[in-house]
Image (tube, rainbow, N blue to C red):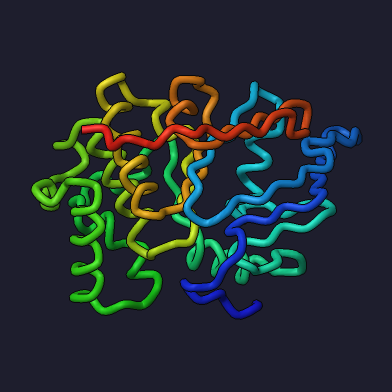
Amino acid sequence: MQPPRSSGDQGPVIQVRDVFKTYELGGIAVRALRGVSVDIDRGEYVAIMGPSGSGKSTLMHILGCLDIPTSGTYRINGVDVRGLDEDDLSDLRNRYIGFVFQSFNLIPRTRALANVALPLQYAGLSKPDRLTRAKTALAMVGLTDRADHLPSELSGGQQQRVAVARSLVTNPALILADEPTGNLDSHSTHEVLGVFEHLNRQGRTIVLITHEEEVAAHARRIIRVRDGRIVGDTRSDRVNQVVA
């Protein structure tokens, strides 16, 4: 794998160039992506939108290094994913990407602090270092007082905020959130989007996959995907406000 960029390096976090993705279904070639090119710079807050079958989920899988392009190039934090084997792709994900999913994916019988610290265990950090960094991540999402709670003792919004803290604990170049408010009520949605806005104001790069216009409106840039192509890319001049 190529050496990682240092935190002070310039350049986009994401560089996608003429990416095609084709699947074989029942002997028929299905083109999920058709020549997608896009850059996402450090510190951007981007929503990717599209209807079912538009290719947005395929694009998300490629951005998250969960799949690789059939052709074209994808670089994350300066690293080209072409030719990487599964071990290298896994290492790339662990180094550079923090994932937040619609289902919170918390371990039910594990307290919030331990759930957040889990990625650091895979990274080989000592237990004291893991706990210190996990406490810092929980503080960033406003849940210091819930560190010893089980997921069942937390609201949906609090569980998703724990998941956001877990995505932050490795200090990734990119937070990739896939329909993160899909299982939340309006109050919890408000909570979680407030956390994303706060993190973005601190300089975090966030890419949000959503089909909801009101959720996408919180981003500073909206990329629209249809029939495997980017059909819209608009930026907002508004300044994100932290939602209390």
Which quadrant would residue 50 be assigned to in this image? top right
Seen at 82% across and 49% down, the residue is: 18
Against 75, is 208 above or below? above
Q: Residue 210, how many percent across, how many down?
A: 52, 29
Which quadrant would residue 31 be assigned to in this image? top right
Against 204, is 127 above or below? below
Seen at 60% across and 70% down, the residue is: 87
Extreme-front residue of the structure:
237
- Quarter the C terminus occupies: top left
Q: Residue 169, how many percent across, how many down?
A: 33, 61
Seen at 70% across and 47% down, the residue is: 38
Q: In the displayed structure, does residue 19 sit left or right of residue 193?
A: right
Judge by depth and name the residue closer to the eye, 234 or 1: 234
- Quarter the N terminus occupies: bottom right
Q: Residue 48, how many percent across, how many down?
A: 59, 34
Judge by depth and name the residue closer to the eye, 122 or 240: 240
Against 59, is 39 above or below? below
Q: Residue 186, how many percent across, how many down?
A: 30, 19
Against 18, is 136 above or below? below
Seen at 17% across and 44% down, the residue is: 150
How many numbered markers are drawn? 0
Which quadrant would residue 3 be assigned to in this image? bottom right
Judge by depth and name the residue closer to the eye, 196 or 52: 196
Q: In the displayed structure, does residue 75 sit left or right of residue 151?
A: right
